[in-house]
Image (cartoon, grey):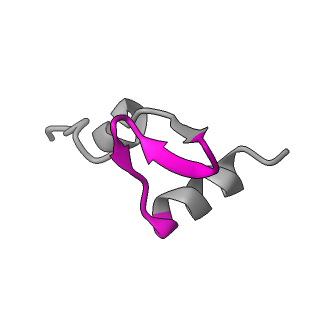
Amino acid sequence: MSSSGAANATATTEPALTKKNGKWYNGDRRATKDEIAQYQQANPK
């Protein structure tokens, strides 16, 4: 049996979304609506 740790690798390496001037960014690019929704679900206010 071999185990691959790559299944959730992207979930832990994604940069946190930031809001600048009323717009959401993922790193230095604009975040998608799906990314914003996932971030808000994972980080409720």
In this view, the residue farthest toward the left is 2
Q: Residue furthest bottom?
A: 33
Where is residue 32 shown, x and y percent of the image? 42, 63
Front one among 11 and 30: 30
The number of numbered badges drawn on the structure is 0
- The percent position of residue 1, horizontal first and vertical second, equals 15, 41
Q: Nearer the viewer, residue 9 or 22?
A: 22
Side of 1 relative to 19 (left or right): left
Residue 23 is a magenta residue: yes
Q: Residue at x 57, y 39 (%)?
A: 20
Q: Residue at x 53, y 50 (%)?
A: 24
Q: Nearer the viewer, residue 28 or 14?
A: 28
Left or right position of 44 against 2: right
The x, y position of residue 38, in whole percent, is 57, 58
Query: Above or below — where is 41 with respect to 42?
Result: below
- Dividing the picture into quadrants, the one containing residue 10 is top left
Give how far across and how far down residue 11 sits, in percent. 40, 42
The question of residue 30 being in magenta is answered with yes
Splitting the image into 4 quarters, where does residue 21 fall?
A: top right
Outermost residue to the front: 21
Q: Residue at x 25, y 35 (%)?
A: 5
Q: Which residue lies at the image location 72% right of the left edge and 44% below the top edge?
A: 43
**Residue farthest to the right?**
45
**Residue range corresponding to the magenta coloring:** 20-34
Which quadrant, please, contains the C terminus? top right
